[in-house]
Amino acid sequence: MSGGAVAGLIASGAFAVLALFGCFVLLKLGKIFDEAAARVRQTGAAIDEGTARVRQAGATVDEVNVALAHVNKELDRVDAITANVQSITTNVSSLTSLFAATLGGPMVRVAALSYGVRQAAAKRTRSEVESRVKSQMKADKAGKAGKAGKAARHTGADDAGLPSVAGATEGRRGGH
């Protein structure tokens, strides 16, 4: 073999090693591309799932917006009702003040007058009763003193002022 043949053999061997190395690299690159394709498919599925969730979230947000719009309408109604209640309260307060001003003063005066009349009538009745009781007691004392003196003269009762038996029976039967 000549030098050119040896060089050709070395070159062909190097080329074979280089070809084997290229095949090995291509095999590894194929696996990498397969893995990348699988990852892309997983990512696509995750993106699709995420997109579905985003769509659900969008629908939920739309429903929440509709509910909030309804709540805002109801709150506007409640505000109107509250304003009406406040107006009614103000009107009732004004009517109460008007009633107190127009009828309250005269009613207080009438109540005070009726109280005074009742007190005066009660005092008058009480004083009449007291005067009758006093006059009756004076009459009774005077009558007893007169009867006791007569009885003492007629029956001889002692000077202690005790009525006799005849005077005692007259007091019980008396026309009082």
Image (cartoon, rainbow, N blue to C red):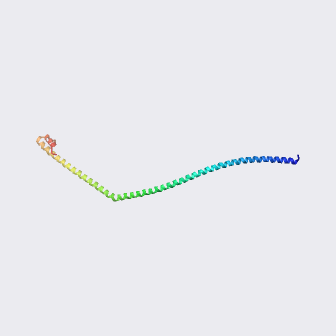
Q: Residue at x 28, y 55 (%)?
A: 114
Q: Quadrant of residue 146?
A: top left
Q: Quadrant of residue 98?
A: bottom left
User: Could you tell me residue 90's position as x and y percent?
Assistant: 40, 58
Specify whether 3 is left or right of 121.
Answer: right
On the picture, is 170 further left or further right than 13?
Answer: left
Provide residue 82's location: percent of width, then percent of height.
Answer: 44, 56
Percent across and percent down for residue 80 are 45, 57
User: Is 108 on the left or on the right of 2, as rendered?
Assistant: left
Query: In this orientation, which residue lies closer to the viewer: 83 or 63?
Result: 63
The residue sitting at the right extreme is 2
- Counting labels gives 0
Foreground of the two, 149 or 76: 76
Q: Residue at x 72, y 48 (%)?
A: 30
Of residues 147 and 175, the one nearer the viewer is 175
Q: Is residue 113 left or right of residue 37?
A: left
- Residue 122 versus residue 29: which sits nearer the camera? 29
Q: Residue at x 55, y 54 (%)?
A: 62
Q: Residue at x 23, y 51 (%)?
A: 125
The percent coordinates of residue 58 (x first, y second) are 57, 53
- In the image, residue 55 sits, relative to residue 151, either above or below, namely below
Question: Quick one: which residue is furthest to the top in this view?
Answer: 165
